[in-house]
Image: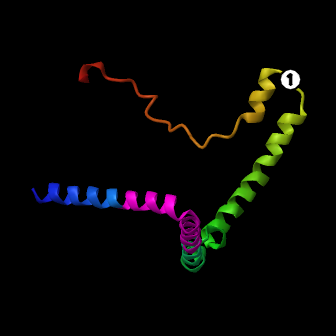
Amino acid sequence: MARSKLSVLIYILIGLAVVGVVSQLFTNTINFLTNIIIMIAIGVAIFAAFYFIFFRKRNPSNSNEMKKYKKAVKHSKAKYKDNKTAITNKKPQSIQSKKKLNKRATHLRVIDGNKHKKKDRATF
């Protein structure tokens, strides 16, 4: 019950504000527009002050993490630069030569188990 009364009160207040804005627009247009422009200017000034005081210090371009990221990107570009130029400059040859260029040494190894022993079928 209290919620419905509160929402009705808010709707009445919004309605009165709309009526006031419309009547101000038709009766005193020049002062209304200057007031709106002044309010927008004050809002922009407050936003700029907050931005330059609080948020500018958090700029990621100055942070240590961004420097590390840029260094890693530079390193990665230098590392893969040779592969790109080698592939683009050479004419397409056979499929086998392409596979040899892209093939990298694997870091896996085969572990030799007990292959020489025969399995005892009776234990299964």
User: Magenta stretch: residue 86 in it?
Assistant: no
Give the tally of numbered discs: 1
Q: Residue at x 82, y 21 (%)?
A: 94
State whether residue 123 is above or below residue 70: above
Q: Position of residue 62 (x, y in %)?
A: 65, 73
Q: Residue at x 59, y 66 (%)?
A: 30
Q: Nearer the viewer, residue 19 or 108?
A: 19
Q: Position of residue 52 (x, y in %)?
A: 60, 77
In the image, 54: left or right of 14?
right
Q: Which quarter of the figure has residue 3? A: bottom left
User: Magenta stretch: residue 35 in it?
Assistant: yes
- Work out which residue is located at the far front of the displayed protein and give it: 27
Helix, strand, or loop for circle 1?
Answer: loop
Q: Nearer the viewer, residue 93 or 105?
A: 93
Q: For mark 1, does the 10 Å Cα neighbourhood hold few (<14), some (14 to 19), or many (20 or more) residues? A: few
State whether residue 81 is above or below residue 37: above
Give amino acid for label 1.
Answer: Gln
State whether residue 66 is above or below residue 113: below
Quadrant (top left, top right, bottom left, bottom right) of the C terminus: top left
- Work out which residue is located at the far left of the displayed protein and give it: 1
Q: Which quarter of the figure has residue 99? A: top right
Q: Nearer the viewer, residue 117 or 35?
A: 35
Q: Residue at x 81, y 27 (%)?
A: 97
Segment colored magenta: 17-42
Mostly what secondary structure, the magenta segment?
helix
Q: Residue at x 83, y 35 (%)?
A: 87
Which residue matches tag 1? 93
In the image, 11: left or right of 21?
left
Q: Nearer the viewer, residue 97 or 44?
A: 44
Q: Position of residue 96 (x, y in %)?
A: 78, 23
